[in-house]
Image (spheres, grey):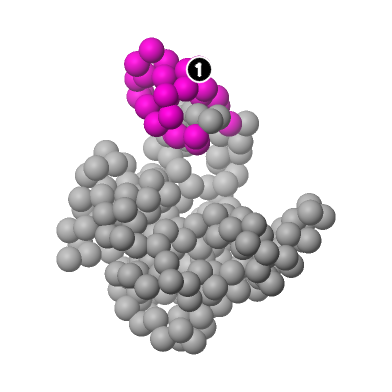
Amino acid sequence: MELILFGAPGVGKGTQAKILADMKNLYHISTGDILREAVKNGTELGKIAKSIMEKGELVPDHIIAGIVKEALQSDKAKNGFILDGYPRSVDQASALDKIFDELNIKNVKLVIVDAEDAVLIDRITGRKICTVCGYILSKGDLLKENKCPSCGNVDSFVKRKDDNEEVVKRRLSIYHETTKPVLDYFKGKTESITVDGMQPIEKVTQDIIAKLK
């Protein structure tokens, strides 16, 4: 199974990617994670990326594409993969298309997790993050004894600075202008399914699996 998980900020792509990766024994390829891994492992591209990041600059698309290609060629991807958060632009989609051709990857499916902007704004601005393990506490979730359900630490949840309404609206605007056109790029090239991301997490997972079958 080879998937690209697609959707707006806060729609739950990362959560679904982790669940599906565990269920189906797939390699969860998050660009942030594999970039940090390449830097840590000192790969050729990782060294280049490190020098760029140390200057406080953004890593160029061609470096990210190279690191994604390395990930797709690794043993971890032998049973399949889930691309999470990539591609984010039409240029990145075109680069990924070329990588798929070079690696003879042909049966990729696009999983679109959809939700209305108003719901996403409410969801993101209402969430908190565990400073110890990164667990996301959604709006309305209750804690027992104020403990993180993932790592057990007490009083470890904070609201991220960039989870305010102004920043979230700007992120969604960038998504609609820059990232959403990727769907048009893949239209007719890649089989796609769409699920309602406004449902509970478990139901979203169930719908993805049912539609993939």
Point 51% across, 69% down: residue: 71
The span picked out in magenta is: 133-160
Indicate the secondary structure of the residue bearing disc 1. loop
139 vs 2, nearest the viewer? 2
Q: Which residue is mark 1?
A: 155
Q: Position of residue 41 (x, y in %)?
A: 63, 62
Q: Name the side, left or right, on which 185 lies relative to 200.
A: right
Q: Is residue 141 magenta?
A: yes
Can you tell which quarter of the image residue 31 is in? bottom right
Q: Position of residue 109 (x, y in %)?
A: 33, 70
Q: Position of residue 9 (x, y in %)?
A: 48, 47
205 vs 42, nearest the viewer? 42
Circle 1: is it few (<14), some (14-19), or many (20+) Cα within 10 Å? Answer: few
125 vs 47, nearest the viewer? 47
Q: What type of secondary structure mainly makes up the magenta span?
A: loop
Residue 138 seen in this snapshot: no
